[in-house]
Amino acid sequence: MLTETLIRPAAFAPPAAFETKSADTPAPTLRARRYRPRRTTADRVREALIKLSEGRASMLSHDEKAWASITFSGTRHELMLDFDGKEAVEVGEEFIANLPEHEFRIPGQLVAEATIREVDHSFNGDEERMVVTAVLLLLEES
């Protein structure tokens, strides 16, 4: 008989007069958080170059290689951008002129060097296209 009274659910129910301070406040509503992947340094480099090109360039490729010396470590980024159309090519020419002196703001990184390695400018009738290969050398800030 003793075992029957111990497993009855009524034996574990709190008394009716039991009260909590949070009973008057409504329960918080739970909202699902949107998953947002963390942006990498490569993502930030691509974003900075697209911004410098005023959004008129298409990213064809991006190659990233880690490097280190005795005193520094960082990454080397080689990117190919496509400026397609007359107006885009004009923006591309400004991009070429402004890249070496541009002040990049990439958290945790210092852009030690930004150069243009190659420019392929082509005409096909009225169509004009320019493919620019830019190289950026980034140092990790410590």
Image: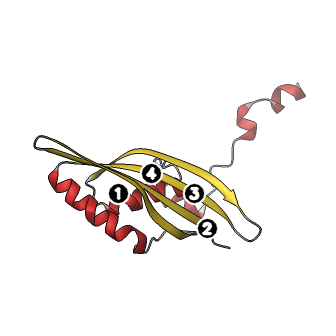
**Amino acid type indicated by mark 1:** Ile
Which class describes the residues within 10 Å of circle 4: few (<14), some (14-19), or many (20+)? many
Q: Which residue is mark 1?
A: 50
- Which dot marks residue 79? 4
Residue closer to the observer: 79 or 115: 115
Which class describes the residues within 10 Å of circle 3: few (<14), some (14-19), or many (20+)? some
Residue closer to the observer: 19 or 36: 36
Kind of element beneath mark 1: helix
Q: Residue sitting at 23 percent across and 61 percent down?
A: 91
Mark with earlier residue (4, 2)? 4
Identity of the residue furthest to the left in this view: 126
**Amino acid type indicated by mark 2:** Leu
Q: Is 117 above or below relative to 8?
A: below
Mark with earlier residue (3, 2)? 3
Question: How far apart in space, not on screen, are marks 1 and 4 (Cα)?
Answer: 11 Å
Q: Residue sitting at 50 percent across and 61 percent down?
A: 136
Question: How far apart in space, not on screen, are marks 1 and 2 (Cα)?
Answer: 21 Å
Q: Which residue is mark 2?
A: 139
